[in-house]
Amino acid sequence: MSNPYKRVLLKLSGEVFGGGRIGVDPVVVSGIARQIAEVVSDGVQVAIVVGGGNFFRGAELSQSGMERERADYMGMLGTVMNAIALQDFCEQAGVPTRVQSAITMTQVAEPYIPRRAVRHLEKGRVVIFGAGAGMPYFSTDTVSAQRALEIGCDALLMGKQGVDGVFDSDPKTNPQATMFDELSYDDYLAKDLKVADAAAISLARDNALKMVFFNLSVEGNIRKAAHGDQIGTTIVR
Ligand code: UDP
């Protein structure tokens, strides 16, 4: 199998980890880990940013009365739980894996050290970044663009729960919604689409980072995305 990408950043939405519920669904996460193991054995270096929407979203908690910053820290801690779960299943699938957290918690994860992350990747280890940016008001989408840039990834692969790519309107509520195969960063921003936040898209645009949105819920899609096959929606200049 040819590898157009040497190193990819895979963003896994938290929603998928819970299989639609709160918490971690071991069947789903072990399936994702097996796909990641295949990609690594194909010779592609894989770094991962995990979301936390299956536990807490700061904006939602703050709407129900919590202080926003505290709620965001809860959201970030949720991403670390997902990171640890994924590490466990990746190692069960035979891939050595390191978790790096943007919030220091050395008993469970290394601190975020980009050069060390690159070293792990070069040795064939998967690196999972948890705790987002370690800062409230950010999203794991934005962090995935930042990490992809900082550790020199060739593409940012945005895996979403149950959605095939970027649509002109929400396919869950509008059956007429149509999917884009390709879209420019500027068109994405002008249309005010909500699949990833605008900060992530503009960071990718300003630094010419290729983004691919694809459906994580379809078995085999991670491998297709990591091999640069036409899948989902590609955002380019
Ligand atoms: N979060 C944050 N700063 C970050 C990343 C995440 O405050 O750098 C918090 C925020 O509250 C967010 C939650 O963590 O709602 C979970 O992340 P996200 O919503 O991005 O997860 P996903 O939607 O991908 O599952």
Image (cartoon, rainbow, N blue to C red):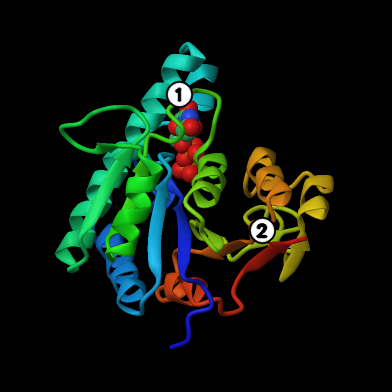
Kind of residue sitting beneath label 2: Pro
Q: Which mark is residue 166?
A: none
How far is disc 1 from disc 2 in space, using C-alphas?
A: 28 Å
Badge 1 crowding class, 10 Å Cα cut-off, few under 14, some 14 to 19, many 20 or more, is many
Say whether residue 124 is left or right of residue 142: left
From this viewpoint, which residue is outermost toward the bottom? 1
Per the image, the residue denoted by label 1 is: 72
Q: Provide residue 48's location: percent of width, then percent of height.
A: 40, 53
- Quadrant placement of the N terminus: bottom left
Against 130, is 207 above or below? below
In this view, the mark in front (1 or 2): 1
Per the image, the residue denoted by label 2 is: 171
Against 208, is 144 above or below? above
Q: Is mark 1 within 8 Å of ligand 1?
A: yes
Residue 19 in view, yes or no: no
| Residue beneath the point at 15% across and 32% down | 107
Find residue 70 and report its image quarter: top left
**Of residues 210 and 157, the one drawn nearer to the viewer in this rendering:** 210
- Helix, strand or loop at label 2? It is loop
